[in-house]
Amino acid sequence: MRPNSKPYQASLNYGYHFCGGVLINDRWVLSVAHCWYSPYAMQIVLGEHNLRVVEGTEQVMKTDTIVWHPSYDYQTLDHDIMLIKLYHPVSVDSFVRPVSLPRGCPPAGMECVVSGWGNTLSDGVYLPLSLQCLDLPILTQAQCDTAYPGMMTSTMLCAGFLEGGKDACNGDSGSPLVCNNEVHGLVSWGTGCAQRHYPGVYTKICSLLPWIESTMASN
């Protein structure tokens, strides 16, 4: 993909990339709660494309505050979301730019794009250095419930291809699912990666907007 074409993409880093995130304004990054790591050790890298090359477009930010959702359940991954407040505001430019929060929930069939630096093999490990992206559709609630009976909650949505072959994967956690220039999901979990009948499961941003907005306002 074209370098820096996803200027909202963040890399959570403690000496190496371990999760993704998404810039939602000049001071706040969203990611998933299961990516939590000591705020003193964690840096947020924005404007990144190749993880090994300093391209001059990067902004490396320290974290000020990290807020988990109070209802986060590490076993079921319900409410798998956290907000990261940056120590200083980013400089918004063509390489680092926030994405909008959604105005509503995405309909099934809506075309979206997921980006990240996660594994690109379904039966092995190949961690790409350059940011990857994939176009994929939102699936229906019925398709999600069939794939994951009794496991989907109101804070989850699923997206991808029931025939398998293309999906987000390990290392992509927390990375954004963007539809019509709004962030609608964060990579959360799935059964394997790109497995037939098992689409990717994403934190459903529209169901968590009140918490996101009130948390930013009170911090």
Image (tube, grey):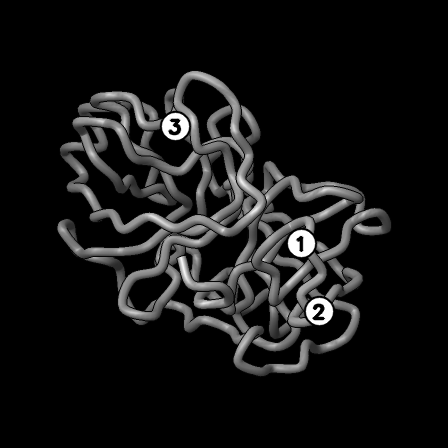
**Residue at image location 18% in from the left, 29% down from the top:** 162
Counting residues from the N terminus, which is met first, the one under dot 1 or under dot 3? 1
Q: Give the structural element (helix, strand or loop) at label 2.
A: strand
Q: Which residue is identified by label 3?
A: 190
The N terminus lies in quadrant = bottom left
Q: Which residue is identified by label 1?
A: 67
Name the mark nearer the viewer: 3 or 2.
Answer: 2
Name the outermost residue toward the right.
40
Q: Which residue is identified by label 2?
A: 59
Q: Amino acid at mark 1?
A: Val
Counting residues from the N terminus, which is met first, the one under dot 1 or under dot 2? 2
Q: Amino acid at mark 3?
A: Gly
Q: Is residue 101 above or below residue 201?
A: below
- Identify the image quadrant of residue 207: bottom left
**Residue at image location 59% in from the left, 51% down from the top:** 82
Q: Give the structural element (helix, strand or loop) at label 1.
A: strand
State the image coordinates of residue 141 (x, y, percent, origin top left).
Answer: 18, 39
State the image coordinates of residue 205 (x, y, percent, origin top left).
Answer: 40, 56
Counting residues from the N terminus, which is met first, the one under dot 3 or under dot 2? 2
**Residue at image location 18% in from the left, 56% down from the top:** 110
Q: Is residue 131 left or right of residue 17?
A: left
- Identify the image quadrant of residue 164: top left
Q: Give the structural element (helix, strand or loop) at label 3.
A: loop
